Image (spheres, helix red, strand yellow):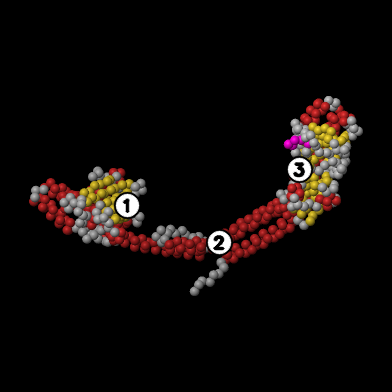
Amino acid sequence: MKNKQTLTLSGLIILLVMAVTGSIVILSTWIFTTLYTDALRSGAATSSEQSLNQAASVISNYTANTNQLMRRVALELERQTDSDELGDTLSALVEMREDLCNIAVYSLNGDLLDSWSSKQARKQVTGRLDLRDVEVDANGLYITPPHVLNLYKDYYPWVITIACRSQIARYGVKEVFVTLDLQFSTIAAYIDDVGTGTQGYTFLIDQKGRLVYHPQQQLIYVGIKNEDTLRYAKQGDGVYTEGNTQRIVHSIPQSRWRLVGVSYLNELVETPRNAALRMIFIVGSVALVLVLGVAAFAMKLVSAPIQRLVAQMHRFEQDATGFQYQPVSGTQEIAVLSDSFGHMVCRIQELIEEVRHDQETLQKTELKALQAQINPHFLYNTLDSIQWMCEVGRTTDAVQMVGALARLFRISISRGADLIPIRRELEHAESYLIIQKFRYKDQFQYRFLVDDTVLDCLCSKITLQPIIENAILHGFGEFVDAGEIVIEVRDDGTDVVMSVTDNGVGMEAEDCERLLLEKEDRASGIGIKNVNDRNQIYFGERYGLVIESEPDEGTRVTVRLPKTWGDDRAPSI
């Protein structure tokens, strides 16, 4: 039967606080959105109108400065009598003003009488000045729509022409038109700088509704975009709103031009609305902090101690021996429950340790019993070989064999120590090899490759002899050619590695696994598994034996040991 899920007290508190917080956030959002949207919509028109008014003032000042320039040019034309000096003066004036491209004089019929530019070569055939559709402004200036200046070779700037009627006696007529051709980019820069948002724009028309400048003029010429300029020309100055679009019409003082600014209300209120949303986010964050504070208090008071206790129970189930209990504080009932669980943990760990210690003691006792065994068959064969050597007069060999047997037994006893220096283990292995080499009549050879820096490290007693014995009995059994056994001891940087390698008959992988499973060797009584088990008991499960073998290729048995230094630092063998 499944446990019925119920709502905890801490969960209920959190839900209530979250509900209150959510209500506050929603209410704050509605208030901010309503008040800010209304205020920003009303303020957008004022801001845009101020921007257009500023641009209109700049353009008005520009036209006033142009009027002064016009009077200066007319004065120079009347005052100068020398044509070369006049040309130098007016050409220098054109060169000084970046926006001034050309100064010219036309007859009232529109014929070109004279012109000055900055080092430009004039065409032989030029256009005429046509002011029929251009009305004069309050300053008596004729201002044409933008057009291409076509008076000079390889020079076609986009200009507006400003003209005025003047009486210049040098041309032999009553009146002429003095003109200034100004690059329209200067006025366009003023208009483009008007702040109507990233999507909004401002354009310039005359009193008849003709476009003077539009930032998207090319789109209008090709018919992609359309502006109702005639309607704007008829409307008075003011703000006109149609849905999301807001248009402001503003006349430029002392001019027949009008500025029209187009903006979009949703964009103009976007930045302030984002500020309002940031305020709401701050309010929500504060509310969230309050929620977390209340939830943390509830969890600390009621739920958190129980959850910590349950978590420690789960950890104890996963690792009973390595678990370290930390008492849980809280209410009186939780404290009593925590103490009871702590006592239970201590008692269970004591029982586990007792069982583990008893099993380890029993296993070490069994291993010591195996180590203490002396194989009667091996001892009989060795003594029989010594007797035969004495009978045939090979006393030197018999003495060497008796010495090797004595060292073998002395190191096997090792004053009852379970761990001996590697140098003693190598002496034990060499004594065994000397005896077996006599017995097998030099059927095999052996050699040692030893790193002297690890000779004083400790290893389990009688580690190499069972491995060497296995190599002799099973590796060389019916071996015809001379066999070889290589005993190597080296430092791999982290551990000490001992290996026994033979060039015998080898074995299959399943035979390697069988060697690590057999408890006793029929000949010596101490099997390969016994060596592996002893190393893991003394040094840990990551240490032990690895057997590598290929049929007809030989066998390599590797023993990995930690760098454990002993006090007995005897001389090297």
User: Is residue 520 something one can see in this rendering?
Assistant: yes
Which residue is under mark 2? Answer: 299
The disc labelled 3 sits on which kind of residue?
Ala
Q: Is residue 378 left or right of residue 550?
A: left
Q: Residue furthest right?
A: 174
The residue at 81%/26% (across/down) is 85
Instruction: Calculate the distance from the C-alpha at mark 1 to the C-alpha at mark 2.
Output: 51 Å
Give the mark, 1 or 2, whose residue is nearer the N terminus: 2
State the quadrant of the C terminus. top left
Whether the magenta-drawn stretch holds residue 153 is answered as yes
**Residue 58 x %, y %:** 79, 41
Which residue is under mark 3? Answer: 188
What segment is highlighted magenta in the picture?
151-155
User: Is residue 462 something one can see in this rendering?
Assistant: no
Rendered view: 158 above or below 480 = above
Q: In front: 117, or 288?
A: 117
Which of discs 3 and 2 lies nearer the camera? The answer is 3
Give the mark, 1 or 3, whose residue is nearer the N terminus: 3
Whether the magenta-drawn stretch holds residue 422 is answered as no
